[in-house]
Image (cartoon, rainbow, N blue to C red):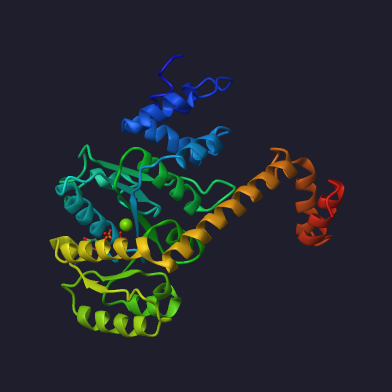
């Protein structure tokens, strides 16, 4: 078997009639081969026919990575913080993965290689692996791909995986279910942190960071957050608030200490295990949905000719989506 396509992320080189040798792929992954990692993640992102077999194998790995979600609004300093954290872990000799779910992240675009001085001392480090989640696929959100990417990095021997996500909403909540620790980052000014308090983000944070601690209002933000956390339902883990100045690498050690504490706590905690169970249940439901969807549409997706006709009728208000769905299910002998 030729190896060009195995070692290339250029899928067009792959003969579509030839199945990928998964034993070989996983040997390459376990040896830490980044090209094999890139190929595996692309196959998953593209929902390749072999991606489920790949996912099954990923779950058999005994390697474990600590996955940390870093979340918050654009501009609060997530990427800066991640680069500093990555640097600190790399200095300790750890293998660090970064997954950018944020499409605007400098990790995903050319600016990573541009003039952003904060990345200069980590990029190119052989113990660092950066990937972005490219597509939502049609079967799951970004969190589905991100979860698989964490597992790929785990198999490759990465010990810490930092996942950058932006904004709030389903994807954000989804991401908090697939990581071990969720760090919510806010910044003083602009009312960012007050928005966080109002929007329910408080509920998903295991650790809070007030970044841009060099700015006015940072201490007030810490206090406000602490108060908001007090209002949370009582639990054994009291989320700490850490003040950082990412651009000066200040507060990074303190954040690492809290990450360590939380890792130790959640390894033993029933609440954290409950969250993992919920995440596992979501995955089973996802898998069932995918199977039902594929079975129902027979690979045609929503592109079929009759679908075009239905959507026209819905647009023209001659029918509605619910009646169409009922009709389609009846045609297939379901319901
Ligand atoms: N003053 C100050 N600026 C910061 C700090 N951390 C990041 N920034 C700046 O804030 C901007 C946004 O940072 P970035 O990491 O891209 O934020 P992200 O969108 O949350 O990933 C950049 O111009 C950073 O240089 C900090 O601690 N203090
Ligand atoms: Mg960013």
Q: Quadrant of the C terminus?
A: bottom right
> Can residue 118 be seen from the camera position used here?
no
Say which quarter of the image contains residue 166.
bottom left
Say which quarter of the image contains residue 205.
bottom left
Q: Nearer the viewer, residue 78 or 117?
A: 78
Image x and y of residue 49, in percent: 58, 33
With 288 as the anchor, is 169 left or right in this view? left
Image x and y of residue 47, in percent: 55, 39
Image x and y of residue 135, in percent: 49, 46
Q: Quadrant of ligand 1?
A: bottom left
Going 17% across and 61% down the picture, which residue do you hit?
247
Going 76% across and 59% down the picture, which residue do you hit?
321
Vertical placement of residue 127 versus 65, above or below? above
With 174 as the anchor, is 73 left or right in this view? left
Going 44% across and 14% down the picture, which residue do you hit?
2
How many marks do you count on the picture? 0
> Can residue 292 be seen from the camera position used here?
yes
Q: Nearer the viewer, residue 189 or 137?
A: 137
């Amino acid at each position: 078997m030729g190896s060009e396509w195995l070692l290339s992320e250029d899928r067009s080189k792959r003969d579509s009639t030839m199945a990928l040798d998964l034993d070989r792929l996983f040997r390459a992954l376990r040896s830490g081969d980044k090209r094999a990692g890139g190929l595996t993640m692309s196959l998953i992102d593209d929902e390749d026919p072999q991606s489920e077999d790949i996912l099954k194998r990923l779950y058999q790995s005994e390697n474990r990575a600590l996955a940390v979600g870093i979340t918050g609004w654009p501009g609060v300093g997530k990427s800066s913080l991640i680069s500093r954290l990555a640097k600190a872990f790399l200095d300790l000799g750890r293998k660090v993965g970064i997954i950018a779910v944020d499409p605007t992240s400098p990790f995903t675009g050319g600016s990573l290689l541009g003039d952003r001085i904060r990345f200069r001392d980590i990029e190119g480090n052989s113990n660092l692996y950066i990937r972005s989640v490219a597509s939502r696929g049609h079967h799951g959100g970004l969190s589905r791909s991100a979860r698989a990417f964490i597992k790929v990095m785990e198999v490759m021997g990465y010990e810490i995986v930092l996942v950058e996500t932006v904004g709030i909403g389903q994807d954000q909540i989804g991401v908090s279910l697939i990581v071990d620790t969720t760090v919510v980052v806010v910044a003083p000014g602009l009312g960012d942190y007050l928005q966080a308090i109002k929007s329910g983000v408080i509920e998903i944070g295991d650790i809070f960071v007030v970044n841009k601690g060099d700015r006015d209002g940072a201490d007030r933000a810490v206090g406000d957050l602490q108060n908001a956390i007090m209002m949370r339902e009582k639990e054994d883990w009291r989320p700490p608030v850490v003040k950082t100045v990412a651009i000066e690498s200040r507060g990074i050690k303190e954040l690492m200490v809290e990450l360590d504490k939380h890792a130790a706590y959640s390894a033993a905690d029933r609440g954290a295990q409950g969250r993992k169970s919920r995440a596992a249940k979501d995955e089973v439901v996802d898998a069932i949905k995918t199977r039902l969807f594929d079975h129902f549409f027979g690979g045609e997706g929503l592109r079929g000719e009759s679908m075009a006709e239905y959507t026209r009728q819905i647009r023209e208000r001659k029918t509605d989506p619910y009646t169409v769905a009922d009709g389609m299910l009846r045609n297939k002998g379901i319901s």
